[in-house]
């Protein structure tokens, strides 16, 4: 319609990441500054991604809004979202003040629409991909010149681990030392193309009850675990160096050992917290046992488990060991949903897993879904918009 | 029969002890020298005890022998048993060399017969009570003047935790610093009479598979856990002081908190070992949850869980809180064997435990036996012998 104000819009996707050196503990809760550095693998957006469209227009009135998976979110009262929006607007204002020809987008109401391509039932924390997509989409809308590292400082304020989802491949989040968090940012250790053979199989385990939320759990650990200081100050810094070298050298055995040890160390300080925090259950332990069996059978480390703040197992392995690792799980869980798709199609049943019967039965009864994926790239700008040319949200696919 | 050589014999019982500050890690494997001090509660021999008769005679020939629960044990090849026998004989020799009128018992073959009053199925490590009874019985046979502390140095070489079963009540095992282990011994912190109201309820959980044996597990932890040094060097020494004060002050809340924290710390360093060691399972965690629920309901700590190298829960509580603590478990497990006897008779069902259904069902399905007991005294000399006047083993009650 001629004469009506322009609708500015841009869309991006952002990936999920799963840490191999865990983030657990904040030294500053408001700024999401961590007690230690962490490192993750960015997972392919073919399997898991958040898709976000950011738009603004003089025709939009009222407060900024966000629709997530078809539901309106209350971003007014979300300090974390507000911190991200404020930082991005401020960067846009700097551009506008330097170049008078630029439209004053920083003054306009933002409409954001976001959708995940994976069900909430997958039990995966979607906040990392969500905040990464939000920051990346608005940065694109505002045509900000900042690098992914610089934007990661903003995404970090939304959700700590979101900073690692602004890049693909193997990504470190440097804890930093500055009080204002300006050096607490993500850095690419290696792109996905450096070691593209990395695969991940997620075993989604139905928890008997919801675990302690991670922000609350982290604070309990920081305040009460007597073992945690050694982890924060000595153990993780040493492991960060070792695993970065393993990634550079494509040394899967070292990568696998450190990944498993660091997951165990994280759950150890959870158990050492007061009151103790439990995320692993008997199904998680059966997954650990199956990974140990696969490694024993191979005579070397061909698989690595890692667990976040819940019972779900993420199992890393190299493409060449698909049959020895993922094949064992496909044999145990042939009818479990999630084996379809490019990564899953490559996995055939391996009937020779030599698992104990108890492990086999525990996994069979306890895993409700699998996700087959692998290392992937960072956020991608796409042309498919979740807001139409009139500024209205596009109906969500059901 | 006149003219036949005299049969010397003496009998003793010795108790089981359950640590509240855990022993996990040896600084010297041969001598059983620990990486840290520990502290335990000696449990009543009304519920759990080993009964041992030691005898010697010129009429006995051949090597020393031990019959345990009706089965001949191979003590010839047991370095730990041999170390105990050698030390005890050496002390007897010193007496004999000073007083020529004493019979030369140190030169005679020993016959030992031992029996536990609790089934192996109870899943309790019986080596502590076993070695304590063996050492105490032979020390009595030899009429050794050594104190329980001095004898504890000998029992420790049989089984580390055995040194704590030579005394009743609340017993510390001081790690010591001497290379030869001469100062690594047990000391009574307080007798049972100081705080006789302490009760213990053991929930015997059938493990899905046998866990890592403790000696091997301890060494794995010492060699690989990066969190363990903080526990050995800082955390346990601090907790020892705090819990000894709590025992002196009869401060159950502090006693309970440290007991639970130290159990969790021990299992945390197990999980942090490589490969990781798991002793807790979902039934153990349900027991923890039930204890936490009882404490929340009481508005203070009235119960404390602790777990050794297996899934069994030991729950400490004071007599005055029997209904609030043990009563909840009796309500969940009314038909589980073990509620009979003096301690069990005092426990009525408490239907108002407010447990989550899942916790209730997990305990109901996973606990195979209970043991009701409380703090008790040290070894007792008794007249009932397991070796008859002719030197032959008395048939075991079936």
Image: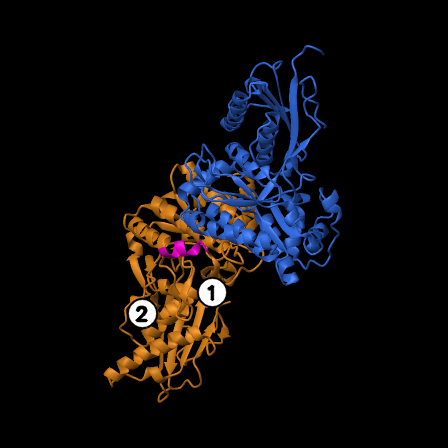
Chain colours: A blue, B orange
For mark 2, what is the residue?
A: B182
Query: Where does the magenta region start and end?
Result: B226-233
Q: Mark 1 lies on which chain?
A: B
Q: Which residue lies furthest to the bottom in this view?
A: B3
Q: Is residue B2 magenta?
A: no
Q: In this view, does B398 lie above or below A227?
A: below
Number of marks in the rendered image = 2
B281 or B391: nearer the viewer: B281
Q: Which of the image's four quarters has the N terminus of chain A? A: top right
Left or right: B60 as drawn, with respect to B358:
left
Estimate the x, y position of residue B365 in percent, counting from the top left. 57, 48
Estimate the x, y position of residue B264 in percent, counting from the top left. 44, 50
A398 or B99: nearer the viewer: A398
User: Crowding near pointer 1: few (<14 within 10 Å), some, many (20+)?
Assistant: some
Are labels 1 and 2 assigned to the same chain?
yes
Left or right: B2 as drawn, with respect to A374:
left
| Residue B221 shows up from this direction | yes
Estimate the x, y position of residue A7 in percent, counting from the top left. 65, 18
B290 or A19: nearer the viewer: A19
Estimate the x, y position of residue A222 in percent, counting from the top left. 42, 42
| Residue A70 shows up from this direction | no
Residue at horizontal 48 percent and vertical 39 percent from the top: A184
Residue at horizontal 58 percent and vertical 58 percent from the top: B209
Determine the image quadrant of residue B385: bottom left
Q: Which chain carries label 2?
A: B
Choose the circle earlier in sequence order: 1 or 2: 2
For mark 1, what is the residue?
A: B215
């Amino acid at each position: 319609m001629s004469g009506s104000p322009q609708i500015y819009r841009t869309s991006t996707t952002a990936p999920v990441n799963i840490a191999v050196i865990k983030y657990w503990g904040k030294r500053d809760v408001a700024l999401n500054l961590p007690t230690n550095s962490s490192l993750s693998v960015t997972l392919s957006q073919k399997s898991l991604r958040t898709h976000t469209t950011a738009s603004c227009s003089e025709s939009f009135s009222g407060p900024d809004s966000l629709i997530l998976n078809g539901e309106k979110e209350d971003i007014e009262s979300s300090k974390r979202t507000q911190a991200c929006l404020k930082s991005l607007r401020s960067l846009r204002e700097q551009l506008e003040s330097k170049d008078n020809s630029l439209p004053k987008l920083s003054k306009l109401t933002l409409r954001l629409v976001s959708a995940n391509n994976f069900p909430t039932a997958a039990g995966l924390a979607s906040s990392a991909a969500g905040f990464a997509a939000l920051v990346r989409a608005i940065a694109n809308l505002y045509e900000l010149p900042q690098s992914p590292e610089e934007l990661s400082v903003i995404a970090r304020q939304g959700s700590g681990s979101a900073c690692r989802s602004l890049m693909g491949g193997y990504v470190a989040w440097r804890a930093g030392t500055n009080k204002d968090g300006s050096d607490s940012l993500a850095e690419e250790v290696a792109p996905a193309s450096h070691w593209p053979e990395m695969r991940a199989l997620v075993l989604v385990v139905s928890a008997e009850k919801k675990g302690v939320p991670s922000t609350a759990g982290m604070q309990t650990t920081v305040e009460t675990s007597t073992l945690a200081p050694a982890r924060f100050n000595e153990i993780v810094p040493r492991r960060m160096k070792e695993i970065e070298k393993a990634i550079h050298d494509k040394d899967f055995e070292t990568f696998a050992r450190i990944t498993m040890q660091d997951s165990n160390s994280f759950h150890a300080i959870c158990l050492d917290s007061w009151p103790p925090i439990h995320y692993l259950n008997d199904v998680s332990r059966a997954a650990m046992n199956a990974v140990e069996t696969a490694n024993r059978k191979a005579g070397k480390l061909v698989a690595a488990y890692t667990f976040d703040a819940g019972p779900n197992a993420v199992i890393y392995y190299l493409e060449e060991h698909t049959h020895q690792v993922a094949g064992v799980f496909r044999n145990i869980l042939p009818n479990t949903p999630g084996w379809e798709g490019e990564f899953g199609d490559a996995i055939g049943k391996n009937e020779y897993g030599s698992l104990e019967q108890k492990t086999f039965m525990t996994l069979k009864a306890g895993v409700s879904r699998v996700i087959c994926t692998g290392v992937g790239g960072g956020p991608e700008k796409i042309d498919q918009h979740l807001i139409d040319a009139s500024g209205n949200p596009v109906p969500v696919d059901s």
